[in-house]
Image: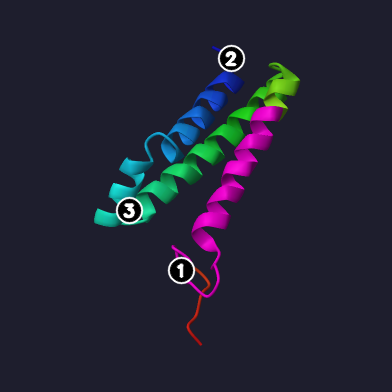
Amino acid sequence: MSIPYIGLALQIVFVLFITVFDSWRAFIINHYSVYPPALFELSLGLLSTFLGIYGLIKGHKVTFSLLVIVFGILICLFFIFVYLLPEAGIPPAIPWLYSKN
C-alpha cells in the first residue's frame, strides 16, 4: 500500500469519527474529558499531513499526496476552530490562552 493511501485511510477514520461514531465521541466527552477525542483528531490530522509530505518527497502519486496534505491541514484547522477558539462568549473547549478578565 502506498504511503498517501494510509494518510487517506486516516482521513476516512476522522470523517467516520465525527459523523457515524459521533455518539461515541459525545459519550467520551460527556463522561471523561474533551482531551481524548481532541487529541485523537489532531493526531489523525498531523499523521495524515506528514504521510502526505512523505509521499510527496518520495514521489508517490504527487497530486494525490498534495490532496492528502491539504485535507490533513484542514483537519488540523478543524481542531483549532472547534476546540481552541471561543464562540459567542462561550469559552473554548480546551482553554489555552483564555482568561476570564
Mark 3 surroundings: few (<14), some (14-19) or many (≥20) residues within 10 A: some
Label 2 secondary element: loop
Give the residue pinned by disc 1: 95
Residue 69 counted in the magenta span: yes
Give the residue pinned by disc 2: 2
Label 3 secondary element: helix
Q: Are marks 2 and 1 in contact (CB under 8 Å)?
A: no
- Residue 14 shows in the view: yes
Give the residue pinned by disc 3: 29
Amino acid beneath label 2: Ser
21 on left or right of 68: left
Number of marks = 3
- Circle nearer the N terminus (2, 1): 2
Report, in whole angstroms, how far the alpha carbon at label 1 lies from the one at label 3: 15 Å
User: In the rendered image of this protein, does residue 15 appear above or below residue 88?
Assistant: above
Amino acid beneath label 1: Pro
Give me the residue at 63% from left, 36% from top: 71
Q: Which residues are magenta?
A: 67-95
Q: Position of residue 66 (x, y in %)?
A: 72, 29
Residue 74 counted in the magenta span: yes
70 on left or right of 91: right
Give me the residue at 50% from left, 45% from top: 42
Q: Position of residue 16 (x, y in %)?
A: 44, 32
Give me the residue at 43% from left, 48% from top: 39
Colour basis:
rainbow
Q: Residue furthest right?
A: 63
- Circle nearer the N terminus (1, 3): 3
Label 1 secondary element: loop
Main SS of residues in magenta: helix
User: In the rendered image of this protein, does residue 38 appear above or below residue 52?
Assistant: below
Mark 1 surroundings: few (<14), some (14-19) or many (≥20) residues within 10 A: few
